[in-house]
Image (cartoon, grey):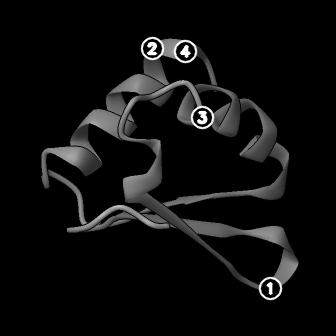
Amino acid sequence: MNAEEAKDVLDKLANREMDEFRITKEEFLAFREFLIKREDFKYFRGNALHNGEIIYTYLEEARS
């Protein structure tokens, strides 16, 4: 996943154009690199699934 793809997905989650986004464990590190640089980082929640997949959602309130 490149920077443009990650930004597009994260923007769509934040703007409620997408409810969730699923990534594989192979994509995780590249995706997270872009996620942690965002000012609204604490509004994203990643839920781990079996086989290393993660579902990201955008929260109404920031995590603590």
**Contact? badges 4 and 3 (CB < 8 Å):** no
* Frontmost residue, 63 versus 55: 63
What is the distance, in whole Å, between disc 1 and disc 2 at their CAs?
27 Å
Residue designated by label 3: 36
Q: Earlier in the sequence, mark 2 or mark 3?
A: 2
> Dividing the image into 4 quarters, which one contains the N terminus?
top right
Q: Residue at x 60, y 34 (%)?
A: 36
Residue designated by label 4: 3
- Residue 20, given in percent of the width and then of the height, sits at 36, 65
| Within-10-Å neighbours for mark 2: few <14, some 14–19, many 20+ | few
Which amino acid, by three-letter code, is at mark 1? Answer: His
Q: Is residue 49 left or right of residue 29?
A: left
What is the distance, in whole Å, between disc 4 and disc 1 at their CAs?
26 Å
Q: Nearer the viewer, mark 4 or mark 3?
A: 3
Q: Residue at x 37, y 56 (%)?
A: 43
What is the distance, in whole Å, between disc 2 and disc 4 at their CAs?
4 Å
**Contact? badges 1 and 2 (CB < 8 Å):** no
Residue designated by label 1: 50
What is the distance, in whole Å, between disc 4 and disc 3 at their CAs?
12 Å
Residue designated by label 2: 4
